[in-house]
Image (spheres, rainbow, N blue to C red):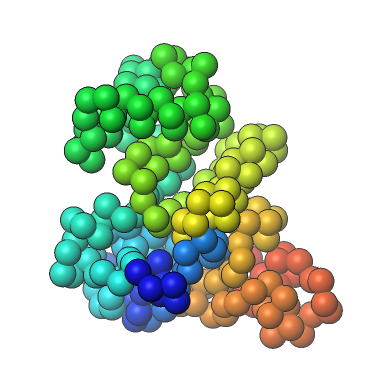
Amino acid sequence: MAGNDFALECHGIEKTFRRNTVLRGIHLRVWPGSTLGLVGPNGAGKTTLLKILAGLMPPSKGTVHIRGEGFQTAPRRVQRLVGFVSSEERSFYWRLSGRENLKFFAALHGIHGRRRSQRVDGLLEELGLGAQAGVRFQEYSSGMKQALCLARALLHDPPVLLLDEPTRSLSPDAARRFRRVLRGKAREEGRALLVASHDLRAVEELADEIALIDGGAIIAAGTLAALGQQAGLAPGAGLDAVFEQFIPGT
């Protein structure tokens, strides 16, 4: 991949369920080592877009490229380049331990034997779950569950991470620790992150650039400073003020 290539790029993404169009001509780009924040009201299409970008759902129109490769030509290879972090817990096995869950999902990625054990144990330690590796998932706190979600997404070492409401239900301390880990994944490890969240302060802290989505369309995108200028706000305005200007009354 050339140094000036995008890690993630989508053009003209549309999604229609029967007669209901939920995404309208979405264009997004994320550089390696950077974080794009995606914010918008409930029902704006954030989760649907992330599922399309992760290869979990086909678009009705448009293209997605991860490191220059498209799902249309090499879906399995491209899907291995993406890690998807959701706040949903239903896909884990509640009676298995954190380590057992990760070993199961590692096997689905074709990771076996000593390599699997090393990868699983390394991620558990890195994300602060080493001491709780043998504890059943059903006994994990919200913060521990979300850390395990991130560990699962990192099992196959993807260059792109997609995160849907990653700090929802977390305590302030747990959310702060989680954001610190995410910053490291982008800035120190060079991964590209796309974070969809209602937590405007978290997005403001994490994101290099921000895209505002409403009614299934991107209505503005850029750095926080550029968005504030576009909205006619004073220098230094926060994302909450920007959000209110572009999407008032939400």
Please give left or right for residue 43 compared with residue 22 in the image. Answer: right
Q: Quadrant of residue 172?
A: top right
Q: Quadrant of residue 22?
A: bottom left
- Choose between 122 and 199: the one closer to the eye: 122
- Answer above or below: position of 232 versus 167: below
Q: Is residue 28 above or below residue 78?
A: below
Classify residue 240 as left or right of residue 157.
Answer: right
Q: Is residue 248 above or below residue 165?
A: below
Q: Is residue 165 above or below residue 95?
A: below
Residue 124 shows up from this direction: yes
- Residue at left offset 22%, top offset 25%: 113
Measuring from the top left, give residue 5's x and y in whole percent: 41, 74
Which residue reaches farthest front?
Answer: 2
| Residue 129 rendering spot, x and y as whole percentages | 51, 24
Which residue is rendered at x = 16% and y = 69% of the image?
73
Name the image quarter holding the N terminus: bottom left
Q: Nearer the viewer, residue 214 or 37?
A: 37
Q: Relative to residue 183, is residue 153 drawn left or right?
A: left
Residue drawn where x is 21% and y is 57% of the image: 77
Residue 175 in view, yes or no:
no
Give the mark count: 0
Point out residue 89 in the picture as x, y percentages from the top left corner: 40, 35
**Image point 38% across, 73% down: which residue?**
2
Coordinates of residue 30 in the picture (x, y in percent):
47, 69
Rendered-image quadrant of the C terminus: bottom right
The part of the image, by quadrant, that contains residue 100 is top left
Q: Could you tell whether 202 is left or right of 94 in the image?
A: right
